[in-house]
Amino acid sequence: GSGKDTAGAGAFIHDSDVSVGEDTGVLDLVGSNFSQIDNAEVERKLKSRPDILLNDETVEMAFQCGRDSFILTSKRLLKIDVQGVSGKKVEYLSILWPCIKAFSVETAGNVIDRDSELTLFLNLPDKDNRAEGFPRNSRTRCKIDFRDGNADLFAVQRFFSDKVLGVDSVQHSQYADGMTGHHDSGSDSFLAWLGDDNRLIDASEADAKFHSDPPILQNCETVEMAFRGRRDMMLFTGKRVIFVDVQGFLGMGKKVEYISVPWTTVTAFSARTAGSWIDNDSEMCLWLDFDDVFNPIRGSQDDPPPPPIPRRSWLEIDFQKDKVDMFMIHRYLSERCMRVSAHNLKSDSIPVSSELLRPTPPGTGEDLVNWLGNNAVSIDDKEADSKF
C-alpha cells in the first residue's frame, strides 16, 4: 500500500464523543476484545468532523472494542484510544506500515480462552525501561484481541502479509525443491522428540498444506524448506520464515500461533553444528530488527537482577543431529538474508538455487576445522575463498 516509503508513528489527542458498539458484550469490554465493523461507515466518520484521514486514504479493515477502535487504512494503522470517564479525551495513534517488522496471529482456544489474537512487532523507539516485570521497550509489541467469531483471523493475517511482505499479485508457483519427496521417518530419538528438535521434511507437502488449510501463505509464495519438531513446524519461504506453534497439552489444544518474520527483518544469523554425544543438537540463530527484550522479576530482593530475556529479538532453533544439513541451512540463509544488489535482498520471485540445497559432502565440517587449526595466523585469501 502507499506510505511504505516513510516510517514512524505519530499521535495527537483530541476531544470528541465516541459511542460503544451495540453488539459489544460485558466480557468483551473487560477482556478488551475487538469485533470487526463496517469499513465504509468508519471511513465516512473519519472523513467528517474531525477530519482524521487524508482525501485519498481508504479504510480497508476496522475493529471496535467498546469506545476504542483499531483501523487499518491504505496508508497506516490507526489506533483510536478514548480516555477518561467522560470519553472526551481521545488519542489518535498513527503507525506507518514500514514500522511493522514481524507479526503473528493466534487462533482461539477453548471456552475459557475464547479470543484470537494479533501481535505486531514494531521498531518504534521508546525510553529505555529497566523496571522488572516490564519490556525494555513498551512500544515494540502491539497486541489486539479479537472476539471469537466476530473477526476473520486469517483474513487479518492475509491483510498484514500484503502490507508487510508486498501485495500478493502473482499466481502460485509450484517450485519447492527443498527435500521434495523426502519421507519423514520421525525423530528416531526420544531425547530429540522431548527437546522438540526440528528435522527436515518435504517442502512441497508443507507448501500445499499452508496454501489451503490454514491459508497462511500468499498465492505467489512458495515453501522452499520445511521443518517439524515434536508438534511445531518452521517454514522457509521466499519472503519470510514462519513458525507454527501448537499450544496446549501435547499440542492437543485448539490454540495455534503463526509467527511471520520477513527476511528483511533478519540482521544477522548463525548456523552451529552439533558437538559430542552430550551436545547432540545443532542450532540456527536469528537476530531481528526490533527490541523485544523483557526484564524478568528476581526471585527475592536478595537476589541479583536476572539477565534480560530477548524474547523475539533473538531466536534460537534446535535441529536434530543427522536430520538437518547445517551447511545447507547456512547457504540458504546467506542467499535469502544477504543484500545482493543496491542493498536489496534477492527477489522473492526468484527461487533459491537447487545447487545451494544440495547435500553437503560428509566430513566437510571436520576438514574445515582441521584446516583452520587452533592458532591465529595469516592465511592465503585465495585458499580461504576456495575452502569456504
Image: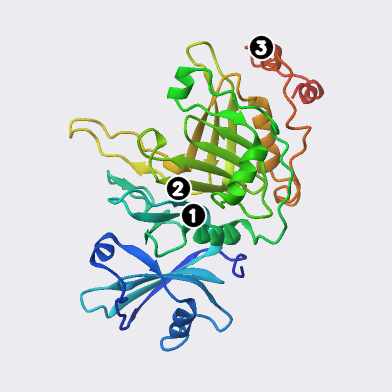
Q: Position of residue 57 (x, y in %)?
A: 56, 78
* SS at circle 3: loop
- Say above or below: 218 vs 234: below
- Disc 3 residue type (three-letter): Gly
Work out whether mark 3 precedes mark 2 in sequence or the reverse, and give the earlier one: 2
Q: Which residue shows up at 35% across the image and 56% down it?
A: 115
Q: Which residue is mark 1?
A: 123
Find numbered disc 1 in the image and state the secondary structure of the residue it sits on. Answer: loop
**Left or right: 26 in relation to 248:** left
Q: Residue furthest left?
A: 301
Q: Which residue is mark 3?
A: 373
x then y, percent, for residue 323: 60, 22
Real-space CA distance between mark 3 and mark 1, rounded to the nearest whole angstrom:
41 Å
Mark 3 vs 2: CB contact within 8 A: no
Identity of the residue drawn at 49% across and 54% down: 123
Mark 2 nearby-residue class (10 Å; few <14, some 14–19, many ≥20): many
Report the residue at 69% width, 54% height from top: 220
Question: What amino acid does circle 2 point to?
Answer: Asp
Q: Is residue 298 left or right of residue 259?
A: left
Question: In this figure, which residue is indicated by the disc labeled 2?
Answer: 291
Quadrant, the N terminus: bottom right
Find the distance from the CA under tag 1 to the CA under tag 2: 7 Å
Q: Nearer the viewer, residue 235 or 73?
A: 235
Q: Which residue type carries mark 1?
A: Asn
